Amino acid sequence: MIIPNKTKDRILIEKLKNLTLHEKDYWSFSGRSRREHGHKYFQYPAMMVPQMIGSILDEICAVHPEIKNIGDPFVGSGTVLTESLFKGLNFTGCDINPLAILLCQSKAGPFLPEDVEKRIEILKHKINIDRKNSIEIDFAGIDKWFRADVQIDLSKIRRAIKKEPSLWVRRFLWIALAETARLTCNSRTSTVKLHIRPETEINKRNLDSLLLFNRILSRNIEHLKSQTLILKSKGYLNINGEYKGRTSLNLLNCQDYKLKGNSKWDVIFTSPPYGDNTSTVSYGQYSYLPLQWIDSHDIDPAFDKTYLNSTHEIDYRSLGGSKKLEDNTIEKITNRSISFKKIINTYRNQPNDRLKRITAFVRDLDLCLDQMISNLQSGGLLVWIIGNRNVGGKRVPLDQIVSELLEYRNASLLINMERRIPTKRMALKNNVSKTISSETIIIMRKGK
């Protein structure tokens, strides 16, 4: 349990400020950011910088060595999860995207690379002796998004993975298949949205899906080995390669994420989307094709076929996905955030869609906060990484809005720090990467 007091608040603030004394741009991690270990399994959009997360965790744990439980209600690719494991902390989190949950499940262990290597050799043999040309999946547009030869190869891989008896091994293999599907589909990889390549380009592509799958497996095994060595050296693994701490991951909307029993988070550490997925980063569209090839039963019971009803379904279920607003929605939020009130007033004479996009997103985020705060113990810390997007040429102050919505729920601001984004793991042609050049790190404390 966190024991807060004004002295610890002052120490934490000073420690964070001191990091920028000798390096003003410390939090950008320019030239010091790299993705390795479990962070490198899959190219997920807009991933956070692991070294930044690790540095913040170091500082808050130095002030509060009693910290044990970290929560992330928007787990994404699992950057906070992996960095929490490196600190020996318990971790629980959720996400509305099944692919994000699969990534995190695989990154949570067990950590037995030698066993995985043995299973991979058996898997490769099964693929090599598979002479079937049948296609394992079917969905609207399959021939549009995957060449016939690619469908055959991915089907061979899928059949072989399904024969693997261990769930945790299958999850590791599904990640490699997901990355293979992403790289061999007919959508452009320069954007997170689904955009078909020209037919001439599709036909000319030199694709060997089986070779690519094997290369990804080899790469991921090396990252699994390096992560295992670190966790072993710190004494965080038991004899069976399982992480000694607790991890829990759930496929659901964070608005519905209630921790079981008397467990509470000591720290909420998260980075939510910076706007509705449709107009910012389309995580759902990005995940749609890879998810088609993965056995849904290996992810979460909540992952049913309705998640893939269309290319937009997951994004529709995400923050701001539904633009339907009740008559009093704006009034409710403006009573909680003066920054929201100010920015909304500037859109009164602009196209109505802009006002709806901003309001729907903030509405859904606001609806999530009550449950988040109830999962956090009194005196617990909140660490949010926030980006302020542009809508209609105006910058939406999401960092201020989030701070005010949390203050409304009896949290107090300790410090906010701006970090420049030297490189952001987003598609090159996505509008967000052009407009958001910095982020704000917000650290707050929950009241009693």
Image (cartoon, grey):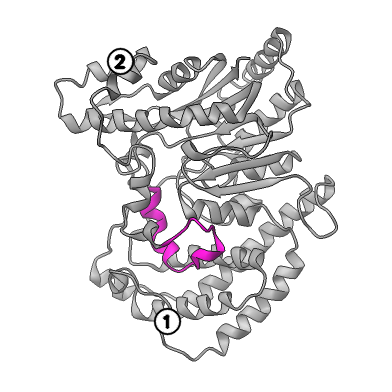
* Residue drawn where x is 46% and y is 32% of the image: 368
Question: Label 2 amino acid?
Answer: Lys
Can you name the residue that lies furthest to the top here? Answer: 6
Is-magenta flag for residue 438?
A: no
Can you name the residue that lies furthest to the front here? Answer: 261
Residue 135 on image: x %, y %: 40, 81
Whether 149 is drawn above or below 169: the answer is below
Residue 317 on image: x %, y %: 37, 46
Residue 361 on image: x %, y %: 34, 33
Whether 152 is drawn above or below 104: the answer is below
Q: Are marks 1 and 2 in contact (CB under 8 Å)?
A: no
- Please give the residue where the numbered disc 2 appears in the rendered image: 341
- Please give the residue where the numbered disc 1 appears in the rendered image: 152
Report which quarter residue 137 is drawn in.
bottom left
Left or right: 363, with 223 as reference point: left
Q: Is residue 358 visible?
A: yes
Of mark 1 and mark 2, the one earlier in the sequence is: 1
Spatial CA span between label 1 and label 2 = 54 Å
| Depth order, front residue of 163/51 | 163
Magenta stretch, residue numbers: 282-304
| Depth order, front residue of 433/270 | 270
Report which quarter residue 221 is drawn in.
bottom right
Question: Label 1 amino acid?
Answer: Ile
